[in-house]
Image (spheres, rainbow, N blue to C red):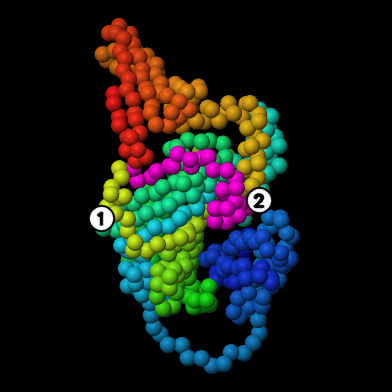
Amino acid sequence: MGVVKDSATGEPMPFVNVVFKGTTIGLTTGFDGSYSIETKSPADSIIASFVGYGRQVKAVVKGKFQYINFSLGPSSFILETVVIKAGENPAEILLRKIIRNKEKNDPDKYDAYQYEAYNKIQIDANNITDKFKKRRIFRQFQFIFNNVDTSTVNGKAYLPIFLSESLSEVYSRRKPRASIEIIKATKISGIENESVMQFLGDKFQHTNIYDNYINLFQKNFVSPISNSGLNFYKYYLIDSAYFDNKWCYKVMFKPRHKQTLTFTGHYWVHDTTFAIKQVEMRIVDDANINFINDLVIALEYDLVDGKYWLLTKDYIIGDFNLIEDDKKTLGFFGRKTTTYRNYLIDQPKDDKFYSNPVNIVVEDSAHLQVDEFWDKNRHEELTRDEKTIYFMIDTLKTIPRFNTYIDIIEMVTTGYYETGNFELGPYASTLSFNAVEGVRFRFGGRTSNKFSTKIMLFGHVAYGTMDSRWKYGGGFLYMLWRWLSLYVE
């Protein structure tokens, strides 16, 4: 990562092309002249170039994070006479055509579609300091710090600590609106909990660039291709090129006003259908979202069956802090990568299929899939960091104290403590107070999935110090079939 500046003025240069020599891996600098780029391809140098300036080449060291800044100077050449006529911003013309063609390009406008989604979520601890490493809690786990790396997004040191994978089948119908996700397989490093598995599916983290507003952290951000986009953004047409054998235009955008819930970034748009081919954007610095330092979203679309523009990959990375407005304390990177395959368009299931009361279903065997299944079915190979997480967690599981920490985390997140076939809790109700009973003591629990995955028995006893009475209750929950349960209390 680094910054490109004008050598004469010292001003940052936006829209500069930065590319690894001998590859097609590149990007353009942002409005502040900054860039961030990485590659696993062999490359020994990086090039910065811009029309009217001499290009500059700098060496890179493979496998090492580097700050590489460029200072470009004007080049001397003669331009033939050209005539420039006043007219409308071509980027704004493109935006209007994108908006006019939303109805045919937005996947949510199709009558029905289904697909297979492969989802990865990685969590990394960042702002790792020497003081943090020396804490007593890590005394038996010092080997994990051998895996500390440096982010190419903002240069922070981070330690990968959590990884999940899920494979789902998603079915969606437009009229009447209905959606079902069946999670076929999940793999989680550290914690196995069905509520967590549901969160790791596709439906909870879906971004549609064609929506006028994109909901993030319970706030509505204006999409860069919103119908009212011209009121919130400035647009710049900066490039055109073949993108997967399709001629596309590249448009950069930035907020028109400060302190609005908007993005900065760019998108590529197809020249004839005016469908979005790719978009990369990050929330503005002054978005003022509690505990969120940064968030980047990237989406890729492909033409399927020669007529449907469909999302094939999305990537989100967020930089979170545990303490608000303190960017130096321990925080976390959250990364989500989802790829989409096997689309079927306008082939809806029958009404009975969509009438299930539960729209996210975890199959009973989802967490039982072996490594051979994942090697065959995951859409893309795990990265070095991702493989490291699984290895690190497997090693940590051999340390009794780590398993104790996992039990505590599960107890805090679920409210119950598992002891074999029984779970004690919920702990939040163990001690309470009210005007009738005074201090109320409650002890209860329920059977765990180790007892049965079809039936759950639960019960409790309670005693109040003011009314001096014992109370009790109980019941059972029976799964009649995968999407329907019988609850009796």
Confirm whether residue 289 shows in the render: no
Name the residue located 42 percent from the left edge and 24 percent from the top edge: 447
Q: Which mark is residue 384?
A: 2
The image shows residue 464 at horizontal and vertical percentages of 32, 11
Q: Is residue 22 above or below residue 413?
A: below
Q: Which mark is residue 176?
A: 1
Q: Is residue 138 above or below residue 313?
A: above
Q: Residue furthest bottom?
A: 81
The image shows residue 484 at horizontal and vertical percentages of 32, 38
Report, in whole angstroms, how far the alpha carbon at label 1 lies from the one at label 2. Answer: 44 Å
Name the residue located 43 percent from the left edge and 73 percent from the top edge: 306
Q: Is residue 357 left or right of residue 61?
A: left
Image quadrant containing the N terminus: bottom right
Q: Amino acid at mark 2?
A: Arg
Confirm whether residue 181 shows in the render: yes
Dot 1 and dot 2 residues touching (CB under 8 Å)? no
Q: Is residue 175 above or below residue 392?
A: below
The image shows residue 267 at horizontal and vertical percentages of 47, 68
Q: Residues within 10 Å of mark 1 (few under 14, many from 20)?
A: few
Magenta-colored span:
358-384
Image quadrant containing the C terminus: top left
- In terms of depth relative to the viewer, which is nearer, 98 or 121? 121
Q: Amino acid at mark 1?
A: Pro
SS for dot 1: loop
The image shows residue 275 at horizontal and vertical percentages of 41, 71
Q: Is residue 308 left or right of residue 397?
A: left
Can you tell which quarter of the image residue 274 is in? bottom left
